[in-house]
Image: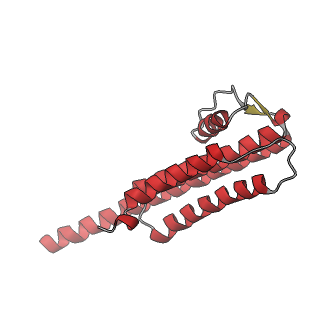
Amino acid sequence: MNVLLSPVLKQIFIYIFTTAIFYLAPVQANSDSIAQPILAVGMIIVLAVVITDQLRKQEKQFFNLIALIFVAAHACAFSCFILAYQEPDQFTGLHTRTDALYFTLTTMSTVGFGDIHPVGQAAKILVMIMIIFDLVFIASLGHALSDSLRKNRTKSLKQTHHDH
């Protein structure tokens, strides 16, 4: 087994790398620096790479889906945190990175406790994008499960015909 290509190690690296960027990336109020938007775009690019990898392989493996959700949650949470940090009136109750991740996960899971919520227009647009992502992801997951069931049924029927 090639350690560098191990799927489990790849997933662990994605989780650690994503979480490290999320918690360690510097964010400053009223900054003219392009570093913050570059970091947000960078996380979105990582999300795009994970999505592309998932679609290219068409394996629909559990770990790939978890990686997709994990990176998407951190990318969305980082975007929420930057927005709340730059414009504190955009969200109610969002003050820390953990608040942002908590809000993102409750939104993505459709739980939505209401303790943290968007107030400003930019925050509402960001949350709408997150909801659209959720809907597309759920539809894609449903399609993948349906496709997998169909392939397994076809394979099972072929196996039954060959056995007789």
Left or right of 22 in this view: 3? left
Q: Position of residue 139 (x, y in %)?
A: 55, 54
* Residue 61 seen: no
Query: Between residues 148 and 6, which one lies in front from this camera angle?
Result: 6
Left or right of 17 in this view: 80? right
Q: How many marks?
A: 0
Query: Between residues 91 and 27, which one lies in front from this camera angle?
Result: 27
Color style of the picture: secondary structure
Residue furthest to the bottom in view is 162
Left or right of 157 in this view: 100? right
User: Which quadrant holds the N terminus?
Assistant: bottom left
Q: Position of residue 23 (x, y in %)?
A: 62, 43
Q: Position of residue 27 (x, y in %)?
A: 75, 44
Residue at 44% x, 52% y is 12
Give above or below for 8 relative to 156.
above
Give above or below for 97 relative to 1.
above
Left or right of 126 in this view: 43? left
* Residue 37 seen: yes
Give above or below for 58 relative to 17.
below
Query: Between residues 115 and 80, which one lies in front from this camera angle?
Result: 80
Q: Position of residue 26 (x, y in %)?
A: 72, 46
User: Which quadrant holds the C terminus?
Assistant: bottom left
Residue at 31% x, 63% y is 152
Residue at 57% x, 39% y is 109
Q: Splitting the image into 4 quarters, where does residue 113 fall? A: top right
Residue furthest to the left in view is 164
